[in-house]
Amino acid sequence: MKSHYYFSVKDILERKYFEHAKVIAGHNGLARQVKWVHVVEVTSIKNLLNGNELILSTGIALQEEGCFLSLIQQLVDCDAAAICIELDTNISTIPQTVLKWADTYDFPIIVFEREVPFVSITQDIHTSIINQQYERIKKLDSYGQNLNKLLLSFNHCRDILQVLHKELDVQVLFQLKEQGVEIHPHLCSPEEEILLNKYYKHKEAHDHHFASAKVILFDQEYAELCIYRFDHPFSEYELLILDRTSTALAQYLMRELYFNEQKRLEESKWIMSWLKGEQSCERLAAFMAEQKISIHGGVVCICRTEEKEKLDFPFFNLVARSIFEQCGFQVVPEKMGEDVIFILLDTRKAADWKSRLTDAYERILKSVFFKDSSQTLFATGKYQLEMMAIHKSYETARETLKFRSKNDDRGRYYFFDDLHLIRLISIVNENVNLWEMIEEYLSPLLHYDREHDGDLMKTLKVFLSCHGSKQETSKRLFIVRQTLYHRLKKIEDLLGEDFMTPDKRVAIEFLLAADEYLQPLSFMQRTKIH
């Protein structure tokens, strides 16, 4: 396999100033990478090295065996490449204990049996390293530009993997999330099995023969790209190439997902038939079979936004789909006007569908689309166990959108199951003139607030929601107790001393909710009445 800008100890030994050098320990460490050269004549260096340095020494500070062992230990701990010692200048032999220690840690000890100019060695190696870095930058830039050009013509992820393999001549492994590992180029079955076993072991305990990069889409790990070589660790160039390729894969996958999403939206006529309850059992059964997953139920949600700038719906669908799927819902999207409708097919147990969907809403609303906006909401219909009844969930989702309180600033997602009182009000309103009842019970407060710019209606609502607790009411209204007592006395004067008796209290609470439900038409109606 090729070695891309990987300068090893073995490569150093082939340079002209090392003609008379000899490796006397740590022979198994000759593949260590050399990134720089230092001349060291002290024994305390652990804070002076960054790793992969080739150390040159005349041995002046290594005449005592203990100091020598300490230095070698520090070099190993700092991940230095090797040490080169000039013999017969200050020391003539290397202690056996030092040689044994170096062999144990595969740390090369090289000796010069003749005098060599350290300055010439340093200049030679540094020049070579700097030239390599310059060439690496040019080649990396060229690789990136070529990959960007080819992206437009690629038809499959394998095309990108082929470019990576051709550049580095290494084995490439690619794994989409929750799918199998793809090896490129293909090997015979026994070799692939051996490589896969090594790869899975690398996932548990890092193996320097592998290098991997995450493919990130929508701030989530979507896939992993990995390269493998058996001879020595990867160079910085190879790691940078791997990173560039993972970015290209992310761009390619994003493009494919985007085009597929557009196609999905264009081919959605049958979805509207499903939402209207007009879809045939045969067509729906065929669609469910295509999903190849177990569906436990389904629910429809409607996303409505009043953003000033229109959303990029295909891209928004990609983000929302990713989050919904992580929460256990297979997604069938549909766009209707400025609303986005999601048919969510539940792939997990139905018992916790609501908590999982709540989590999904929270995450979507914190995404780049809505994090700075409060003009977006999700309305959720009734959960259905039968897919042929999904139109009922759609109808109830529309009711939820219609019934949601315009004065409720506590949330941005609503569930049909939570609309207990509002659903009752809706039914009553179809058969009874609620305006007359509101006027009968609440007109004194309405008139007082209108004429005195008062807050008696709001005070009464909060007081009842706090179950008559004056302390909690004053806290929620941000008023002192004395002010609350004054208001409650006024409410008692206007509604009667019995306004907190059980029956009358229930009626008042119901009509307060009805008044809120009938907004904003209530003001127009009252104007006509008066």
Image: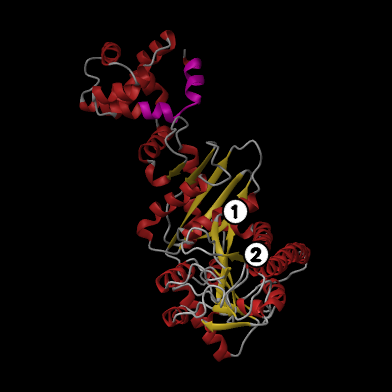
The image's colour scheme reads secondary structure
In the rendering, at what x and y percent does residue 10 appear? 62, 80
Toward the top, the furthest residue is 452
Compared with residue 504, is residue 172 higher up or lower down, i.e. above or below?
Answer: below
Image quadrant containing the N terminus: bottom right
Residue 522 lies in the magenta stretch: yes
The residue closer to the viewer here, 223 or 501, is: 223
Residue 280 left/right relative to 440 = right
In the rendering, at what x and y percent does residue 408 appear? 43, 32
Query: Tag 1: residue type?
Result: Asn
- Element type at mark 2: helix
Q: CA distance from mark 1 to mark 2?
A: 32 Å
Residue 127 left/right relative to 112 = right
Boundaries of the magenta span: 512-528
Mark closest to the chain's N terminus, 1 or 2: 2
Compared with residue 379, is residue 214 higher up or lower down, i.e. above or below?
Answer: below
Name the image quarter holding residue 139: bottom right
Query: Tag 2: residue type?
Result: Leu
- Element type at mark 1: helix
| Residue for point 55% across, 55% down | 219
**Which residue position holds label 2?**
240
**Which residue position holds label 1?**
317
The residue closer to the viewer here, 35 or 200, is: 35
